[in-house]
Amino acid sequence: MALPAVLLLRHSGKTLTLTSSWSCSRRATLSSASCSCRQRKQAPAPPPRSPKKVPFRVLVHGKTLEDPYHWMSNTDDPNLLDHLHRENSYAEAFMADALPLQSALASEMKRRIPAAVSTPPERWGPWMYYQYIPEGKEYPVLCRKLENESSGWPAAFRRCGLARPEREEILLDWNELAEKYGYVHVGTCRVSPDHNYLAFVSLAWARDATSLFYTLSDENQRPYRVLCRRLGCGPSNDLPVLTESDPSFCVDITSTKDGKFITVNSNSRTSSEVYVINSANPMEGIQRICKRTSGVQYFVEHHTGLFYILTNSPMPDSKWSGDGYYLVRCQVEDIESTKWLNIILPDDDTSIRDMDIFNGHLVLSLNKRGFPLLCSLNLPMQSDLKYQVYIADLKPWYFPQPSSSCSVIPGSNHDFLNSEYRVVLSSPVMPDVIVDYDMSRHTYSVVQQEEVNCVSTGQFCIQSLELHENKIHEGYNKKECIMNSESQIWKDLSRIYCLQREEVISHDGVKVPLTIVYSRESWQQYKSPGLLVGYGAYGEDLDKGWCSDRLSLLDRGWVVAFADVRGGGGGNSSWHRSGSGLNKHNSILDFVSCGNYLVSEGYVQSDQLGAIAWSAGCVVVGAAMNMYPQLFRSAILKVPFLDVCNTLLDPSLPLTVLDYEEFGNPKIQSNFDSIFSYSPYDNIPQRSCFPSVLVTVAVNDSRVGVWEGAKWVAKVRDSTCPNCSRSVIMKTSMIGGHFGEGGHHSQCDETAYEYAFLMKTFGILKD
């Protein structure tokens, strides 16, 4: 069972816990009225020395691509390291006059962090698991304590022979890993069923707690093979379980919640195949339960002899014609017959995003008209259900939550026998709230809310939870949902910060959700600077959770807006499809439409709009800047994917083959033409004024090569207005990876640097 999906330690919007180690253009000229060259501070002189150019040509579909910076993809070339050091020196010189502001920003961000940062204990069997950050340290420590015998634990646990320690047990200290390796990013932690072992790779334990199933990666860092090791035996005795030969698929392993089956999943970006292993008899072998079909995904759980399967497989002869996922049940003995007993369909305007299962309840993660929701259904379900039913027919209990919540993140919830479901609720104006929902009694308890120093108590709104959007579900009975005690309330900052949700009409008439946040006191219509956040890839939701660092912008009058463009998460899979592959231009134009909306509606001053994105999201922002450079004053591109065409033409690189389903395969001409038309590296406007840009890259980034940002910066300097391009800087981490190396306080330093860059390039250095 996965441990820290939320023994989740979020602070200031930064998830300090573990995540899986594999997650697996049109152009416009700049008018003289909007030219920002004259408004910028002088960049340091002389400009950085240009990197060497080495002729490199490749012929693709009759088109010759020239790439003089192709040599940078050889990370062993000593010239690359020298170039990165020179760029770091230039970035330091460029930011020299912003050091006082950067220092002030970092200090106020750190002052907001409470002295003690910890998660509330979460029960699993006889143990209480939790995390905290030790005083003076950067990273969390994973700990546990035995529950007190007087608290009603079953006597069976006391007969296990587990001695109670006098003090807490430290299971994993991220600080020690950081000291050893320079930075830390660990895969998902998994505790053995007997609570005696902890491992952190892609793995699953058999019920005997001595058989360990794990994955092996190939030379492209693709998990492609599953092996089984018996504890006490060496690697030479490991047994092969499954080998995935298709380079567009990765394998991962998990267990069903009740621990009775190990599931082996082979996944591409849009398709999956699922196998199961009897956890009680792991040597019996592996069985396939769901065969791969293009565009079809499966997620499998088990409960009392039934497999519950969440899928988007087409349903012939069905009364439901919706798009997205639905839930089916089948008997374990019918594993290969695909005989589905019941089909549970989402209600109108609702999509199913995920499921979780317990001894007495099934939890469904939903999205209704763009809003995240959770509900529970009682288990076991009656056996005489109709072949097809809707969620509403099963009398679900919808979890009450604040109407302002933008982020609903399930906790670890690893105890199958528990009737409480832990969730982290959050929004740009609401510090993270950890809530336990009692699914048996239909009550809830606010366990903990993140503290924010330097904010007076009188500025908080004190409220109890309501059903999301109050009457979004007909038949909701508010009296059913009560708190466990009168003190269980949540607080938000809506008195001083305004949160608005708008729908922006994009180029083709589609409505794009835009979330806007600003200070009621500091914001000035038509006069405020703004920052537009985007991503738009892989069907992933844009994180709109709480981040206390963001107050440093809001309190200075900035607007922060989140554009949920196509290609990202949007309720159902069609939102992703309409912004991927040959439809990728929709993501870009959605982002541009949201930027134009902020300016035209007066949220942001016309020449004071910035943009920020991470990783694949930089495709959207990079392409938008090429098309409409006059729209943006500055941008921040973090570990950016920018050289889309060249990268996808090289199948030897990690993620390339996997990304064919997301962006297209450039070996197919229609795909190549589409990719080349928006690829940020291939469409930089010639001799045009260009926004100021901060690019951050990492030498040890295994997902997006350090050369992506380095090549793009070099080409921008070659191509655009020489004065503008001097305000394009690159900062390289020599030890970090794709997820950064920052800990508790050093992440504040990183964010302060980024905000100081924005303020400097906006011409508002004075604090």
Image (cartoon, rainbow, N blue to C red):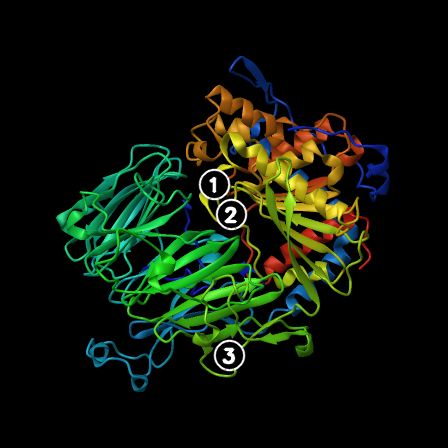
Q: Residue placed at 18% from the left, 42% from the top?
A: 337
Question: Which residue corresponds to the image point at 71% horizontal and 34% vertical from the top-left?
Answer: 628
Residue drawn 40% across the image and 35% down it: 220
Which of these two is toward me, 580 or 513? 513
Q: Earlier in the sequence, mark 3 or mark 2?
A: 3
Residue behind mark 3: 488
Relative horizontal placement of residue 7, taking residue 230 as reference (left or right)? right
User: Which corner quadrant of the image does residue 495 belong to?
Assistant: bottom right
Determine which of the numbered discs, if any, sits on residue 570 in the image. 2
Farthest residue, direction bottom? 150
In the picture, the quarter occupied by the N terminus is bottom left
Question: Within the image, what quadrant is residue 5 found in?
Answer: bottom left
Q: Nearer the viewer, residue 288 or 223?
A: 288
Q: Above or below — where is 477 with respect to 620?
A: below
Labels 3 & 2 near each other (Cβ < 8 A): no
- Label 1 sits on a secondary structure element that is helix
Image quadrant for the C terminus?
bottom right
Q: Residues within 10 Å of mark 1 (few under 14, many from 20)?
A: some
Q: Total label count? A: 3
Q: Is residue 19 left or right of residue 49?
A: left
Residue 411 % position (x, y)? 42, 64
Is residue 453 at least partly visible in the picture?
yes
In the image, residue 141 above or below residue 385: below
Q: Taking the image as drawn, is residue 212 in sight?
A: no
Q: Amino acid at mark 1?
A: Ser
In the depicted view, which residue is nearer to us: 586 or 559? 586
User: The residue under label 3 is which amino acid type?
Assistant: Gln
Q: Are marks 2 and 1 in contact (CB under 8 Å)?
A: yes
Instruction: Locate residue 35, reporting x and y percent.
Output: 83, 36
Task: Classify mark 2: helix, strand or loop.
Answer: loop
Tell me how far mark 3 sits from mark 2, CA to CA: 31 Å
- Tell me the residue that label 1 is attached to: 574
